[in-house]
Image (cartoon, helix red, strand yellow):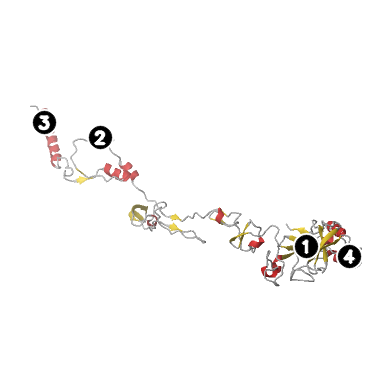
């Protein structure tokens, strides 16, 4: 062997020896994996827990015989994206979660598992009252309710009042100011007075009591006291109207007729009208009585007796007679009546005596007598009347 070949061989041996020394300095075997008896969760189990809440299951580790297959599981980035984050703005607090209920807190001050503290009020029932009611904070299970009432309808609510959005019926009003009695209301008609229904029993043309209260024999007028009852203080109602002359009228609630309070307006306002009677007491003939009442209008020649109305007329004999109180005399008007200047003598009616048509009926207020006399006799006065409204 030449020297050249010898040198090459020695160099190779030296190199192999050096490699052997390096290899012998470490462990030539592959590091061992986990013992096959150890149980653990996979990354996929962790992702499923975060994503769906699945319980997952630990598995026994088995030494893999090959490398992982690409795309068979979720990456760490995907797992991190599924994990909850701190939310101090929208995260629930314990007072927003039902007491005793567990939840995952997202606030930095209450992270991880928490127990709610919201009061459990269960079924809450409210009864409407006249004042506002506070609804207690807490959980309501949905079975509570606000008490209803089938009577909460318009027909049960007074006009002008609204209850829980229901407007009162215009026909339902406060009747406490009513003071009418059955005798004040027409028969067949119904009225509500002070909360009670009142059935009328007053006839359209009522026959008033005579006013006589003294009995002179059993079964006479003073004994039986028949007719529609009345009390002077409530029967006659005075009212002021118009602007000049006689401005006060009196309404007789018994008949509905309206009379001038001045029972002899001619004498007070137009004394010259009774020129056919030199006595100057307002007495005129029957025809003049008609002429006078015809002229009593707001713009007519005798407007001072109009009291603001233009529909005055001469009363008929029954209308005049309805004012008579047979318990009285000189004048025979009810005691305490509101009329002024009442004449203790005859008042013309517009009624003619059918037997002698040249004669007219009059009512004498001295004793309440009803008689007839020649229409040309200038001895009786005028008391205008009008129908009530």
Q: Are marks 4 and 2 in contact (CB under 8 Å)?
A: no
Specify few, some or many for label 2: CA neighbours under 10 Å numbering under 14, 14-19, or 20 or more: few
Q: CA distance from mark 4 to mark 2?
A: 135 Å
Q: Residue furthest top?
A: 1
Chain-order first, disc 2 or disc 1: 2
Q: Secondary structure at mark 2?
A: loop
Task: Give whichever of 67, 375 is nearer the camera.
Answer: 375
Q: Earlier in the sequence, mark 3 or mark 4?
A: 3
179 w.r.t. 98: above or below:
below
- Discs 2, 1 touching: Cβ within 8 Å: no
| Labels 4 and 2: the sequence-earlier one | 2
* Residue in the image at 76% along x and 66% along y: 324
Q: How far apart are labels 3 and 2 at the CA level?
A: 48 Å
What is the number of the mark on residue 320? Answer: 1
Judging by the rendered image, the residue that carries numbered circle 3 is 9
Question: Image quadrant of residue 214?
Answer: bottom right
* Residue 69: mark in rendering: 2
Helix, strand or loop under label 1: helix
Residue 271 got which mark? Answer: 4
Q: Position of residue 343 (x, y in %)?
A: 82, 68
Marks 2, 1: nearer the viewer: 1
* Callout in the foreground (4, 2): 4
């Amino acid at each position: 062997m030449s020297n050249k070949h010898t040198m090459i061989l020695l160099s190779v041996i030296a190199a192999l020896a050096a490699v052997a020394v390096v290899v012998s300095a470490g462990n030539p075997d592959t590091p061992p994996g986990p013992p096959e008896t150890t149980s653990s969760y996979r990354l996929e189990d962790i992702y499923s827990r975060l994503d769906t809440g699945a319980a997952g299951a630990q598995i026994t580790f088995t030494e893999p015989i090959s490398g992982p297959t690409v795309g068979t599981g979720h990456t760490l980035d995907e797992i991190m994206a599924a994990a909850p984050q701190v939310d101090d703005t929208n995260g629930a607090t314990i007072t927003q979660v039902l007491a005793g209920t567990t939840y995952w807190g997202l606030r930095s001050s209450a992270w991880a598992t928490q127990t709610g503290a919201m009061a459990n009020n269960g079924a809450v029932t409210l009864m409407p009252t006249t004042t506002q009611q506070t609804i207690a904070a807490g959980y309501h299970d949905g079975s509570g309710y606000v008490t209803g009432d089938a009577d909460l309808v318009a027909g049960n609510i007074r006009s002008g009042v609204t209850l829980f959005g229901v407007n009162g019926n215009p026909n339902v009003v406060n009747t406490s100011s009513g003071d009418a009695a059955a005798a004040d209301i027409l028969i067949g008609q119904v009225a509500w007075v002070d909360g009670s229904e009142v059935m009328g029993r007053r006839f359209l043309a009522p026959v008033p009591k005579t006013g006589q209260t003294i009995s002179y024999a059993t079964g006479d007028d003073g004994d039986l006291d028949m007719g529609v009852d009345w009390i002077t203080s409530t029967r006659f109602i005075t009212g002021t109207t118009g602007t000049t002359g006689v401005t006060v009228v009196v309404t007789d609630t018994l008949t509905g007729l309206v009379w001038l309070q001045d029972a002899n307006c001619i004498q007070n306002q137009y004394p010259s009208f009774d020129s056919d009677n030199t006595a100057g007491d307002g007495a005129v003939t029957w025809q003049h009585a008609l002429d006078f009442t015809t002229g009593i209008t707001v713009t007519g020649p005798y407007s001072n007796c109009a009291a603001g109305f233009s529909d005055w007329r001469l009363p008929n004999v029954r209308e005049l007679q309805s004012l008579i109180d047979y318990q009285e005399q000189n004048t025979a008007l009810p005691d305490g009546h509101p009329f002024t200047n009442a004449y203790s003598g005859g008042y013309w009616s517009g009624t003619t005596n059918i037997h002698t048509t040249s004669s007219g009926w009059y009512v004498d207020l001295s004793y309440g007598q009803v008689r007839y006399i020649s229409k040309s006799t200038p001895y009786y006065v005028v008391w205008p009347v009008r129908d009530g409204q």
